[in-house]
Structure formats: structure tokens, C-alpha cells
Amino acid sequence: MSANPIPVIAIDGPSASGKGTVAQLVAEKLGFHYLDSGALYRIVAFAAQQNNIAWSHAEALGKLAESLQIRFKEGEIYLNNALITEAVRSEEMSRGASEVAVHPQVRDALFALQQSFRQSPGLVADGRDMASVVFTDAKLKIFLTASVEVRAERRYKQLIGKGLAADYAQILRDLQQRDLRDSQRSAAPLIQTPDAVLLDTTHRTIDQAVEFVLAAYKNIS
């Protein structure tokens, strides 16, 4: 039993599984705070690029991560008071996030920041190690996934819908490579914890996934 009375719903899963959208909607429905932990790694990748630090330079990335002033407000992302939402949502920063996230120095630097989002009345946090590392005492743990082909198709349609150029085959390869990195890294690999509920969205809509999480939370409340 958690010593912290503030409830957390931890939603982990691979890239483009829809966990971010589901987590945000669940948070809205419950009136909870929301943490997009993946955005933190995108921000580190973006800041590293701005400071000419290679995504492979673990020590420098860790020090950089400790110095960043990050703020989420009304769906927007700010770094050192500069609006960077669109910049960190690019496919390049998606790849960068996966590359910087393999470093324990970066994960350690962001750990306390992530836990600080746990505020009353509750938190919905999505990422890759929310249930396994950051919020091990979460009231509800969800492992949200979908087939890699469906995830690639969703990402492709999302990019096309924004008027951006997209190549399905390239997106599929990127997701397969990212899945491999995320599941095999030594620091907080992507796993389904034994106490997490599996939610496969391959054949589910976003609304159905949201209802699934809300029902699961209601059943344990």
C-alpha cells in the first residue's frame, strides 16, 4: 500500500500506441493532473541539439537535464520560458527522445521532476517506465499497446493530417527500431509489470480505450 495518498494512474506503452491521448482524456474526465513523461526526453533531445551536445554523450546530457526549466501549461510546452511545443513533437525529436532515454544519467536527472507532478487530487502519467520505476505504488497500472503496423499507420495519418510529409515504410522501420531500443536498454526498459492491466488498442478506438481505463480505475476505487 502506498504511503502517498495522492492516486496515480500509470500508463506505459510503446511509441504511437495512443497512450498520450488516452492519458490526457482520462485525466480530464477525472479532473487529475497529467504528465507526458516522453515529452521530457524530447525536451532533453531538443536542448542537446540546441547546445551541440551529441545524443550519445551520457554525462553531458545528464548535466543538461538537471539544468532545464520545463513547464507544461494548457497543452503547451515551455523550455526556459520559450514555447517549444511544435519543435519537440517532430519525428526527429521522437527518435532523439529514444536515444537520450537509454542513459541512466538522464533518467536519474528527470526522476524527481516527474515525481513532482504528483499533486492533489491525482495524476495520470504516461511513458515507458511510469509503472515500473517512477510510480511503482500507482493505484492503477496500464500497459497500453497495439501492433507495430497499426501504430505506424496511425502516426502516418497523424503527420499527413498536419500537412507534413510522411513515409509509412520509414515510420514503420523507425518504430521497430525504437521498440527494440526501448525494450532492450539497461536503464528502465519498457516492460509490462506483473500488476499492470494489458490494454491492446489495435482494434479499439480512443474513446473505447478511455472507457476501459476509467472502468478499471472505478473498479479499484
Image: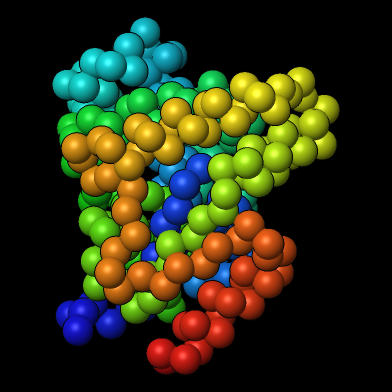
How is the structure coloured here?
rainbow
Quarter occupied by the C terminus: bottom left
Tell me if residue 12 can be seen. yes
Instruction: Say whether residue 199 is left or right of residue 192.
Output: right
Residue 90, quarter of picture: top right
Judge whether 6 appears above or below 132 on screen.
Answer: below
Coordinates of residue 71 in the picture (x, y in percent): 46, 44
- Residue 139 against residue 209 in the figure, above or below: below
**Residue at the image position 43 percent from the left and 14 percent from the top:** 50
- Quadrant where the N terminus is found in the figure: bottom left
Q: Is residue 71 visible?
A: no
Residue at the (80%, 31%) spot, across then down: 160
Relative height, residue 169 to residue 27 (above, below): above
**Point 72% across, 34% down: residue:** 156
Q: Is residue 143 left or right of residue 28?
A: left
Seen at 63% across and 77% down, the residue is 211
The number of numbered badges drawn on the structure is: 0
Depth check, front residue: 183 or 98:
183
Residue 129: image location, x then y, percent = 32, 52
**In this view of the protein, which residue sits in the foreground, 171 or 81?**
171
> Residue 126: x and y, percent?
45, 56
Q: Using the image as rendered, state which of residue 107 and residue 63 is in the foreground.
A: 107
Q: Is residue 128 above or below residue 218?
A: above
Quadrant assignment, res 157: top right
Nearer-the-camera pick, 23 or 33: 23
The x and y percentages for residue 125 are 43, 60
